Amino acid sequence: MNALARLTSRRSTAISGLFAVVSALSVAIPATLAVTAVGCGGAPAQSANPKRALDERRAVQIIISAFKDEGTQAVRGRRVKLAGGKTIEVDVGAPGKKFGVAYTTPAERRKIGKSIPSRDASMGDALILVRGTGDDREARILVLNDSDYFYDDQVGTDHEHTTIAAEGKLRRDVRDFVVRAKAEQWP
């Protein structure tokens, strides 16, 4: 074989080898990138824990307990007339007094409608107080929305909102109301 033929043969072999390497890389690089991308992703995204409001029966128990904590006897409430001809069911009141607490559900809030003022966002989580009308004009009612007392059902350390925290917030809100009623000597 002459020198020219050997050179051409070597060149041909080199070019074939180069194409083989490029072809192998074109398969290997995307596969490597795909594996790397999967490895960098971390754990899959989790949805928020489902939440629900404290049950009204449990909330009433906590409200009664908060009244007692402040040295005020608690009794089942009554219906109080509000502006617009609507009435609200007061869940817990004080005997001989005209103040009480209404723990409201979405159905109750729809029924009451605009008789209860909406919360002013600039006031944070300030409590909503309403006065009765007519014969109930001296009544002062703390209106609590069940949606302010959410918790989740998770166990262990997966809690985002615990039952204890929701119950504690409810107890604090009611105690603040009773302390104010006593300090200002509400009827």
Image: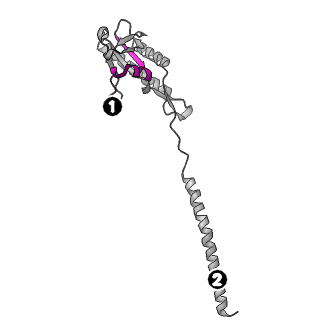
The residue indicated by pointer 1 is 121
Residue furthest to the top in view is: 96
Query: Is residue 61 found inside the magenta-colored segment of the image?
Result: no
Task: Name which residue lies at 61% across and 76% down.
Answer: 18
Q: Judging from the image, what secondary structure is the residue with disc 2 in?
A: helix
Taking the image as drawn, is residue 105 in sight?
A: no
Q: How dense is the environment of label 1, judged by Cα within 10 Å: few (below 14), some, or many (20 and up)?
A: few
The percent coordinates of residue 161 (x first, y second) are 48, 31
User: Nearest the camera: 67 or 128?
Assistant: 128
Q: Judging from the image, what secondary structure is the residue with disc 1 in?
A: helix
Q: Amino acid at mark 1?
A: Ala
The boundaries of the magenta stretch are 95-120
Task: Name which residue lies at 40% across and 14% down.
Answer: 90
* Numbered circles on residues, count: 2
Seen in the picture, residue 180 relative to 11 is either above or below; the reply is: above
The percent coordinates of residue 9 (x first, y second) are 66, 86
The percent coordinates of residue 72 (x first, y second) are 39, 11
Seen in the picture, residue 78 relative to 165 is either above or below; the reply is: above
